[in-house]
Image (spheres, rainbow, N blue to C red):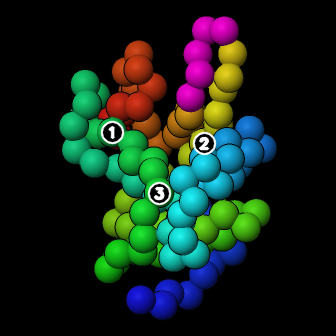
Amino acid sequence: MIAEIKTSAPVTLTDGAKKEIIKLMSQQELGEDFGLRLGVEGGGCSGMNYILGFDQIKEGDSTYEIDNIKVFMNKAHGLYLVGMEVDFQNGLNARGFVFKNPNAASTCGCGTSFSV
């Protein structure tokens, strides 16, 4: 499936997130048709969970390129993710991806679940 690659993504990746994503992609030796999937799904303690992982393009996806990282996002998920920043923290108190979403009315303590 060939999709138009858009350069203006509705989300941003911090330098720390980009570095970690590139590292993980190289460790997993993914093919050229794989990219980073960002999205949402129902569930979690606040109503919705973030999706972050490596995947191939699917029907209904938009494709973006953020500093040479292919990002796939279901078009319907953009409503919940526009303006979101994905960061990666590697500190003593926490290690992992952090989502800063201006659309979230509330978030839970785990940081991966939110409500709108």
Residue 35 in view in this figure: yes
Q: Secondary structure at mark 3?
A: strand
Q: Residue at x 66, y 26 (%)?
A: 89
Q: Residue at x 69, y 74 (%)?
A: 7
Q: Quadrant of residue 73?
A: bottom left
User: In front of the other: label 3 or label 1?
Assistant: 3
Nearer to us in this view, 72 or 105: 72
Whole-percent x, y for residue 1 in the image: 41, 89
Q: Residue at x 29, y 39 (%)?
A: 48
- Residue marked by disc 2: 86
Mark 1 vs mark 2, CA separation in Å:
14 Å
Q: Is residue 88 above or below residue 1?
A: above
Q: Secondary structure at mark 2?
A: strand
Q: Secondary structure at mark 1?
A: strand
Q: Residue at x 33, y 39 (%)?
A: 49
Whole-percent x, y for residue 56 in the image: 42, 70
Q: Does the stretch in magenta take in 65? A: no
Whole-percent x, y for residue 54 in the image: 47, 57
- Residue marked by disc 3: 54
| Amino acid, disc 3 | Phe
Nearer to us in this view, 96 or 75: 96
Whole-percent x, y for residue 33 in the image: 51, 76
Say whether residue 88 is left or right of residue 56.
right
| Amino acid, disc 1 | Asn
Q: Is residue 44 above or below residue 71?
A: above
Q: Which one is earlier in the sequence, the residue at label 3 or at label 1?
A: 1
Q: In the rendered structure, are the residues bearing label 3 and label 1 in contact, judged by CB atoms less than 8 Å apart?
A: no
- Residue marked by disc 1: 49
Quick one: label 1, few (<14), some, or many (20+) residues within 10 Å?
Answer: some
Q: Which residues are magenta?
A: 92-96
Q: Residue furthest top?
A: 93
Q: Which one is earlier in the sequence, the residue at label 1 or at label 2?
A: 1
